[in-house]
Amino acid sequence: MKAFEYATPSTLDEATAQLASSWGETEVLAGGTDLVTALKQEITSPKRVVSLKNISALKGIKASANSVNVGAMTTLAELAADKAIKEHFPSLVTAVHNIGSQQIISVGTVGGDLCQRPRCWYFRNGYGILAKQGDASLVPDGDNRYHAIFGNDGPAKFVSASSLGPALIALGASIKVAGPKRKTRTVPAGEFFRAPKADNERETVLLPNEIVTDIQIPIRGLKNATYEVRHRFGLDWPYVAAAVAFQNKGGTVSDVRVVLGHVAPAPWASSGAAKALDGAKVDDVSAAKAGQAATQGAKPLSGNGYKVQMVRTAVKRAILAAAGAA
Amino acid sequence: MAKVDWPAADKRSLIGKHISRTDGPVKATGAAKYSYDINRPGMLWAKVVTSPHAHAEVVSIDTTAAAAIPGVEAVWHDETLKEVVYVGHIVAAVAARTEEIAQEAIRQVKVQYKVLPHQVVDNNPSLAAGNPAERKAGNVEEALSKADVVVSGEYGIPVITHCCLEAHGEVNEVKGDEMLVWPSTQAVSGYGNQNLAQGGGVAQNKIRVDCQHMGGGFGSKFNFELAPGAKPIAAILSKKTGKPVKLMLDRDLELAIAGNRPSAFAKIKVGASKDGTVTAFDAETWSTGGQGGAFNSGIMPYPLTKVPNVRIIGKRIITNRGGQRAWRAPNHPQACLLTMSALADTAAQLKMDELEFFLHNAALTDRPEVYREELRIAADMLGYKAKAHLRGDPKAGAGPVKRGIGIAIHTWGGLGHNSECDVTISGDGSVEAKIGTQDLGVGTRTCIAQVVGETLGLSLDGVKVEIGKNSPYPPSNGSGGSTTIGGISVSSRKAATDALNALLAVVAPKMGVAADALEAAEGKIRQIEKPHVAMSWNEACALLGKEQITKRGVNVPAESRTAKLIDANVGGVQMADVSVDIETGVVTLNEMVAVQDCGLIVNMKLCESQVYGALIMGVAYGLYEECIYDAKTGRMVNADMEFYRLAGLKDVGKLKVHLMTGPAYESRGIIGIGEPPAISPGAALSNAVANACGVRVPNLPLTPDRVIAALQKGGIA
């Protein structure tokens, strides 16, 4: 870790004013479970770290009849324990519990989960977000067992690490962002993540001097669930995750969203799976069909073909879990 | 005269009992000091500069900029080093007033490399170099051609690392003509070797080693070398600066360079007759241990030493990976996985129950009756009969989750090592035992107190145990090969017995009987025939006045073995009950049982704990662990605790341990336990997965991607 200046602003305005307009010069510190590691690994060595811990406006969960608003500095533990979240969004609760580490759940934040950097081991070993040695990506001919099977035809081959992203997208959440001079904007969760095309880009639409302030999740009575294929029960990353949400009225489903995690540089919305389930009655057969549809378009690399089978299963099981049939 | 022989079962007050380790409280509260916790006045922090290349010529090293940083007190580089042969190879080091300054300084050491081609792939036999090792018995080709069934398979187990919770390193303080060193080591008496002495510029007999507690070694911590062959850097830096220096590896280096367990891959053919008797075993193996060494496959078929027709060809692949080091039962876990997989596949081919198959072929081991007894006990503990089924049987489960059982057997030596102990009895009744041994966390300290306490008729807290230091403590060998418990138990028993006899000689005249008529028991010196005629321990010791009795006990392994104080060679059986989700490839361990003999057990609780620990370690390498190397960059890409996965508490299922006791086992004397139970877990898990899902997953660890690949190849997923 290299030395840096440490700022602890108490308002959003002060915080955004302390952020530079290009990536890497400054970094935002929330729970620190990812950033501190990244600083130690020297994959980022900012001149200034801006801590958000003193900004009270970023904390807390507010529920109304139509939506739940989650402050970005809400911890994952607070999110999973919240009454409204538990009542309406079990997919988020599962996603939090699956992180497996009580320490990370207690300290990590909702905003931090969305903005954490990928776990790609080439990235973590200093080869940049695009895992390049010289001009070529190390991933296609390297050890890519944990890399992307969707959306991997661009320069980015890693998988998004966000635990909450797939569920938030499936639930139709929107993410509020604040920039300098009190400029705010709202980004649909489905548009928040993106695959960088150059080494100096990041994995979200945030500008270097913007901060996630809160997340708005509409209450629409959607059945929802997350299913992760995991090997260890403790702290570990899933191999593949699937979040689903749908209306289930009168025996048939509508308004279906299926979003995959850990398969692409950004959470991967599978419109094929959603279409396959739309209008059906949820049962083993329709869920399996949707699971099969979710694998359409997968382009596994040399070492991650197994993820296709996992996608098939994760989507099927998430659908059955959401419908209460699992 | 008190005798050295171990007391009969009905006479034991401490030996063989369930006793918690005496240093449990200081560990639980954090009061126990490990190397990392040692801070000396004026101490400097050292960090190492390592090669980013897997293979390169070292052209030049410029330390000027690093040395100029305020707070940097010394920069060292290895002038003899012309070539680096793996990523992480140590080339230089700095010592600075703070860890942060040291970290900054290593960035400023400019090393010019001329990059050379590297090779890190170890699973391809065509990359093997040199003449393969070969072992032959009988005529394997003829036996295979005559066998009723011949089963062929390919199996493998990757390079793993020790992953000690406490990293390698030491605090070193060269002070005048003396060197004080606080290392994390498995060999307190042997740590101060000539190289260390030379590094610190002191005489070898002026090295004072102190290691009271250590956080795991598993075969990787016998000397000061942070990586195999590394220089005594902390000593050199302390000598240079005249100040104490702390040098501990960071986690990434600990995983990448502090020692590897060699991989082992094999093509195996087994010939068997219809009744299941193994008649032929033909194996070609390949392995890497980095630049030197590799898996020794000569011990296969393991532990079926009496298979009549055998051919084993062992190839070695040289790689630009970190060097190898002994890992808990060197060669055995690999040999066990390779052999047991091939044997279980043979049983499956014969449509023979795996338990029956192993009971039958126990005849081909050195200790058939022990294995048969242990197999039956393990089967009962697991409820084998109710759960067992043949491979591919619908009884495995109708849904996506299939259940199966796997079996493995193993052996190990474990003869007690050379050890000396001084026991001192003082006039105030206090008793002290000193041994230059070490407690790797297994409870050595506690066992010494038990043996001495037992001998002197005292309770555990009546004995003060001093270990963890070399001279002037009597020398005791390093803890490797499961040799410590035998060594320290005999040396402390002998010392205590001699000391007691000296005390009895003083007491006897006062009690008006011959010393032979007295014994020490229940905190008293009493007449053997009239136990109510007694003197308290303290009264008896008071007769010494200002004198002390100090006696040295020496364990000479061969003599002690003849005297049945210690022995070697144990047998163990393990069975795993797993569930395999064939839609996700995820393997879950439901239950694992371990049945083990190890002669006379000194401490039942600690002995069981050793087995539990070995099972947990085995589940980790069976299901999760592997060093993953990237061929192009030559790097170990998972040198972290995130993708170098270990088992957590929730992952290990229900573990059950049964240790063999009774006169037949106990009359052999004490045998080591540290290694044997770590041998079978991977093999038992692999066989269980094959039994559950109907196909062999050929390579450990049994990760979902490997399981799915095997299922797809087998046409099941």
Image: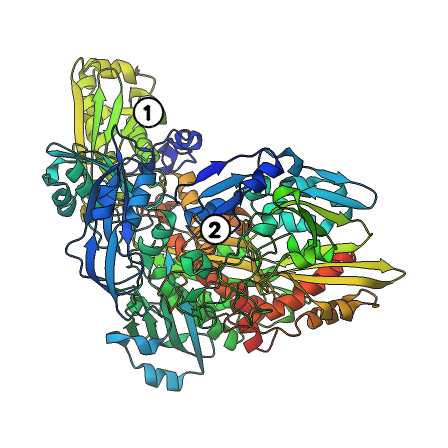
**In which image quadrant can residue A149 be found?**
bottom right
* Marks 1/2 same chain: no
Residue kind at label 2, given as amino acid type: Gly
C-alpha gap between disc 1 and disc 2: 66 Å
| Mark 2 lies on residue | A24
Disc 2, SS? loop
Q: Chain of mark 2?
A: A
Considering only vertical position in the picture, is B257 above or below B708? above
Q: Chain of mark 1?
A: B
Quarter of the image where the N terminus of chain A is located: top left
**Along the horizontal axis of the image, is B147 left or right of A257?**
left
Q: Is residue A157 visible?
A: yes
**Along the horizontal axis of the image, is B624 left or right of B200?**
right
Residue at image coords 12%, 44%: B198
> Tag on residue A202?
none
| Mark 1 lies on residue | B458
Q: Residue furthest right?
A: A250
Question: Which residue is more in the foreground, A143 or B358?
Answer: A143
Residue kind at label 1, given as amino acid type: Leu
Q: Residue furthest front?
A: A181
